[in-house]
Amino acid sequence: MLTNDQLAQWDRENFFHPSTHLAQHARGETPTRVITGGSGVYIEDRDGKKMLDGFAGLYCVNVGYGRPEIAEAIATQAKELAYYHSYVGHGTEASITLSKMVLDRAPSNMSKVYFGLGGSDANETNVKLVWYYNNVLGRPEKKKIISRWR
């Protein structure tokens, strides 16, 4: 098992941390915390310190940590097919079934579900949907996207 000092050194030398002053971090002026586990709404670091995870894993662990039924469902799915894209008409039984389940519970004006991996593909897909929408409405010249900065 690696020591905390060795992990801290490797962390400073090799790992890019977003929203972190990288020069200060590289010099060891910012804290390095190695998270080793979690249960419910709490996380624990290598030193055994238990902390409330107020960010829920940066908003993506809304069901809590250490849920065996979720781990089992993930393992079962990963053994069958961990991932496949949905481009050009491809789908999986899991994505199709989940889409149906979401729409069964969604407001009646929703008709489709899109699963993205993050902001980049979500933004790219939204741009393409706007282009498609304008093409359908007979406005193929409407291709420019105006964004606001600051």
Image (tube, rainbow, N blue to C red):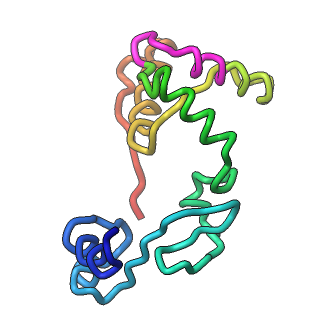
Residue 12 position within the rendered picture, expressed as x and y whole percent measured from the top left: 25, 75
Horizontal side of 136 relative to 42 (left or right) equals left
Residue 60 position within the rendered picture, expressed as x and y whole percent measured from the top left: 58, 52
Horizontal side of 22 relative to 110 (left or right) equals left
Q: Is residue 97 magenta?
A: yes
Q: Name the quadrant of the N terminus.
A: bottom left
Q: How many marks?
A: 0
Most distant residue in the bottom direction: 29
Name which quarter of the figure residue 146 lies in.
top left
- Work out whether residue 121 or residue 96 is closer to the camera in this orientation and state it: 96
- Residue drawn at (41%, 22%), measured in percent from left and top? 85
- Residue drawn at (58%, 14%), measured in percent from left and top? 93
140 in relation to 46, above or below: above
Residue 4 position within the rendered picture, expressed as x and y whole percent measured from the top left: 35, 78
Q: Secondary structure of the magenta portion, mostly?
A: helix
Horizontal side of 31 relative to 94 (left or right) equals left
- Work out whether residue 14 or residue 104 is closer to the camera in this orientation and state it: 14
- Work out whether residue 2 or residue 54 is closer to the camera in this orientation and state it: 2
Horizontal side of 9 relative to 35 (left or right) equals left
Residue range highlighted in magenta: 87-99
Most distant residue in the front direction: 1
Name which quarter of the figure residue 3 lies in.
bottom left
- Residue drawn at (28%, 71%), measured in percent from left and top? 11
- Residue drawn at (65%, 22%), measured in percent from left and top? 99
- Work out whether residue 43 or residue 85 is closer to the camera in this orientation and state it: 43
Residue 112 position within the rendered picture, expressed as x and y whole percent measured from the top left: 63, 21
104 in relation to 75, above or below: above
69 in relation to 19, above or below: above
Q: Name the quadrant of the C terminus.
A: bottom left
